[in-house]
Image (spheres, rainbow, N blue to C red):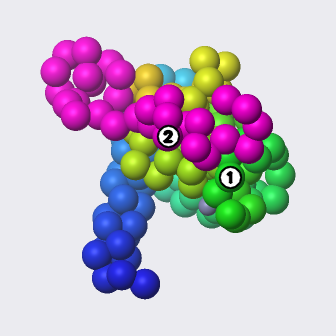
Amino acid sequence: MDMLLVVSRFLMNIWYKAISSFYMNGILWFIFPSSDECMVHHCGFQGVRTVYVFHLTLLVNSAGHIWGKQVWNTGDLSKNNWLLGWIALGEGWHNNHHAFEYSARQGLEWWQVDLTWYVITALQAIGLATDVKVPTESQMRRKALKKY
Ligand SMILES: [Zn+2]
């Protein structure tokens, strides 16, 4: 495999974990607010967050190749799984991810919940994200298993 591809996948993996850790931690803080006096409580949730994100990554890369629907011709077993889409912050639309690996948006349909894409959209709206890539209509037509 091309060394550049290996390195870029490695960096993307770290980036994905960092981003998902960042807002998983925020969600947990919102649900279970802790105070400064209670560091044990806070550190406990750091551990929960780390375990959650690590297991989600593995779950997407295993279950996301077994259960769900395939809508794009990717030549592999990747699937779109709505449950993974919800709990893995959009990465569960794994067939979409395999078909358009450059896309910042994984939930390509309006009904495909993609929390990561919503954050990117907000960052784009305030000018902190630029040159955001999504698949074009012709790219989607070329990869579609059914008529698109
Ligand atoms: Zn995969």
Q: Quadrant of the N terminus?
A: bottom left
Is 45 drawn above or below residue 130 in the view shown?
below
Q: Which residues are magenta?
A: 120-148
- State the residue at coordinates (35%, 22%): 121
Q: Quadrant of residue 11?
A: bottom left
User: Closest to the observer: 40 or 64?
Assistant: 64
At label 2, the amino acid type is: Gln
Q: Position of residue 34 (x, y in %)?
A: 43, 30
Is 74 colored magenta in this rendering? no
Is 136 colored magenta in this rendering? yes
- State the residue at coordinates (39%, 67%): 9
Please name the residue that numbered disc 1 is placed on.
73
User: Closest to the observer: 23 or 34?
Assistant: 23
Residue 32 seen from this side: no
For the image, the number of numbered tags is: 2
Please name the residue that numbered disc 2 is placed on.
139
Position of 89 with respect to 16 (left or right) is right
The quadrant of the rendered image in which ligand 1 is seen is bottom right
| Crowd rating for badge 2 (residues with CA inside 10 Å; few <14, some 14–19, many 20+) | few
At label 1, the amino acid type is: Asn
User: Closest to the observer: 100 or 12?
Assistant: 100
- State the residue at coordinates (62%, 24%): 109
Q: CA distance from mark 2 to mark 1?
A: 12 Å
